[in-house]
Amino acid sequence: MSRKELDNFEPADKEVIASAGIDLEEKMRSASFLQQDAQTCFSRSLIDGVEILRIEDALKEYPEAEEYYGSSFKLLGREYPQDTEGGYFIRVKKGKTIELPIQACLFLKAEGFKQRVHNLIIIEEGAKVHLITGCSAAKSADEGFHLGISEFFIHKGGYLNFTMIHSWKEDISVKPISIALVEERATFVSNYVCLRPVRDITMYPTAVLQGEASRASFNSLILSHPGSLQDIGSRVILRAKNTQAEIIARAVSLGGKVISRGHLKAESKDVKAHLECRGLILSEKGIIHAIPEMESEYRDVDMSHEAAIGKINKDEIEYLMSRGLSATEAQSIIVRGFMDVNVLALPEMLKKEIAHLEENTLGKSF
C-alpha cells in the first residue's frame, strides 16, 4: 500500500483528518493506518517492533490473530456484530518501548456510507506504546454511519495509552464497541475527545482487570452542540487483587444532550476505584445526565464517586469582563479551563497536540 493515494485527497479532507489528531506527514509518528469508507488507503510501520496492517491480512498471515479475534467478547459472554469490513491490526512486540505514537484514521467520505470495522490491538509482555485513533467525516459524507469494534489485549507488564479523537459532523451516527483485557501489572489508559457536532454517539467501552496489580483509566472531554446526542460511558471490572481504576469525565453542553455513564464493578477484594463526572450547561436547551454506578461482591474495597453539574459562575464572567474581555471571550476562557487537557493522561508532546485542537475548535464554538 502506498502513500501516493494520499495525494488524491482533497485539501478539505486532509484538514478534517488533521482535526482528528492525525499527522499525515508522519513526522512524529511510528506507524500509520488510514481507511476511507471500506478501502485501506495506507498502512505502514516506520519502526522495528510495531506491526500494523489490515485486519483481513492479519487474519490470513497470523494464525494467532484468529485466536484473538472476538475472544474478549466471548470472555464476557457478549455478542458482537459479524458483518464488518476492514479495520486494523496493531501488534507491539515483547519488551519494546515505542517513543513516538502509532496513529490510525477511520474516515467517512461517500454519502450515506455505513462503515463497520473490527480492530485488534495487541500489546505483548512488557511493551509500551501510545496509540491515537482519529475518526472523521468529509463534507460529502451526508447521513453516514460508523461502527467501530475494537479489542485490546495488554499482556503482563504492558502499557497502552489509547487516545480516540472524534471529529464528525451534524448528520453522522456513531457506535464504537470495545473491550480491553488487562493482565498482571499491565496498564490501559483510554482518553476520549469529542469537540465537534455529531448526530449521535453511543459508546460504553469496558476494561477487565484480570491480572493482579493491573490498572485502567478512562478520561473524556465532551463538547455537546445543539442537536447532538452523546451517550458516553466507561466500565471497569476489577477481577484481581490490588487492581486500580479511575473514570473521569468532563462535559460541556452548548445545547446538546450528554448522558455520562460510569460503572465500577469489584469482583475481588483489595481493589481501589474512583469515578468522577463534572458538567457545565451553557444553554437553556442543554442537558447533562450523569449516571454513576458502583457495585462490589466484597467489603474489603475502596470505591468512591462524585458528580457535579452546573453553570458558569456569574462572578467569574464579570471578573474577566472587568479585565477587558467580552462576555463571549470570558465564557470561552472559562470553558477552556474546564476542558483542561491535563485531565487526559498524555505525555507532553500529545498534550500540546490535543490542546491545539481544542483551542481551534472551542475558538469557533463561541
Image (spheres, rainbow, N blue to C red):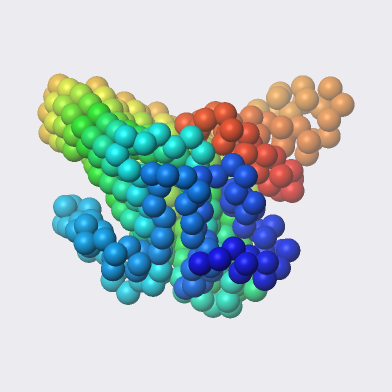
Horizontally, residue 85 falls left or right of residue 18, namely left
Q: Is residue 38 visible?
A: yes
Horizontally, residue 167 falls left or right of residue 237, namely right
Q: What is the tally of numbered marks visible in this picture?
A: 0
Residue sitting nearer the eye, 169 or 296:
169
Q: Residue at x 39, y 72 (%)?
A: 85
Q: Give percent across and percent down for residue 300.
A: 15, 21
Horizontally, residue 254 falls left or right of residue 333, namely left
Q: Is residue 133 visible?
A: no
Quadrant housing the C terminus: top right
Q: Residue at x 40, y 69 (%)?
A: 86
Residue sitting nearer the eye, 130 or 100:
100
Horizontally, residue 219 falls left or right of residue 324, namely left
Q: Residue at x 59, y 63 (%)?
A: 3
Q: Is residue 56 above or below residue 302?
A: below
Q: Give percent across and percent down for residue 60.
A: 28, 68
